[in-house]
Image: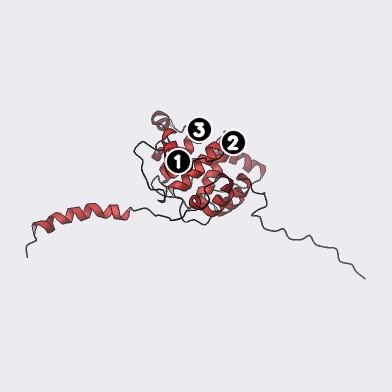
Amino acid sequence: MRSSPASILAVPVLAALAPLAACERSRIEDSAVDRFPRAQQEIDFLDALQSQVVVTNDDALHGLIALSDGTDLNKTYDARVELARRRGWIDAGWNRPADESAQIGWMAVAGCRIVGVQGGATMRLLGPTPRYATKELVFMDVLPLRTENQALSGREFVDFLNRLGRLKRQGKALAVMEDQEDQSGAGVIPAGSPNQLIDQSSVEFGLPSGAFSKPQAPEPQPIDVP
């Protein structure tokens, strides 16, 4: 049986659309920033991210702006996007939905610009592009081993902010700080480690240092012998 012209034309069209369907990104309704958008709710925002499967574009912008400025005074997602464009975190044509999972690439660009990471020769020449910014922050152990098109879970994003904050305050490569920690006897936890996410979050974002620590066992008491 001969195929009709319409069916013949449909084959390449369907083949072209298949990768697009496979690359559809996750969407989250009522993400952390939707529930806790105000500066006074920052601890609640970070706590909500801990159980979120992926960080959304709106979540990521809110968190990165707060890291850069100390607080996010923008009231809407559009205002955050416009601020990110002015600062070179995203390009002029960037137009992603607020509730879509954020790509690591643009978050890495924002992170490099916030803390002043210049990278190697290519990044110094072209500026922080999503690909090279991601590679640089993975190399520095600020990001877990991912590509620029992948996503971060909410917990991984909190850890990402955490490590960027360390660079921003101390102005030195994370590897140097880790060498110092090694020499002092403290263990170095890789980016994305669950223990790092909990322990560092309590320290870096203003919670009491023992907020997530396990209760200490009581000291043994002397036994009276009759």
Total labels: the figure holds: 3
The furthest residue to the front: 75
Give the quarter of the figure containing the N terminus. bottom left
The answer to whether residue 39 is left or right of residue 213 is left
Question: What is the spatial separation of the Cα atoms under label 2 and label 3, in whole angstroms?
Answer: 11 Å
142 and 38: which is toward the camera? 38
Q: Is residue 86 above or below residue 204?
A: above
The label number, if any, that marks residue 169 in the structure image: 2
Q: Is residue 175 visible?
A: no
User: Which numbered disc, 1 or 3, marks the residue that appears first in the sequence?
Assistant: 1
Q: Amino acid at mark 1?
A: Arg
- Residue linked to disc 1: 80
- Mark 1 → mark 3, Cα distance in angstroms: 20 Å
Q: Secondary structure at mark 2?
A: helix
> Which numbered disc covers residue 116?
3
Residue 54 shows up from this direction: yes
Quadrant location, the C terminus: bottom right
Viewed as shown, does residue 84 lie left or right of 159? Answer: left
Decide which of 50, 149 is in the foreground and name it. Answer: 50
User: How far from the left and from the top, in percent, is residue 87?
Assistant: 44, 33
- Write the residue at 56% across / 38% down: 70
Task: Report crowding for label 3: few under 14, some 14 to 19, many 20 or more residues within 10 A (C-alpha).
Answer: few
Amino acid type at image mark 3:
Gly
Residue at left 66%, top 55%? 213
Which of the two discs, 1 and 2, labels the residue nearer the N terminus?
Answer: 1
For numbered disc 3, what is the local secondary structure? loop
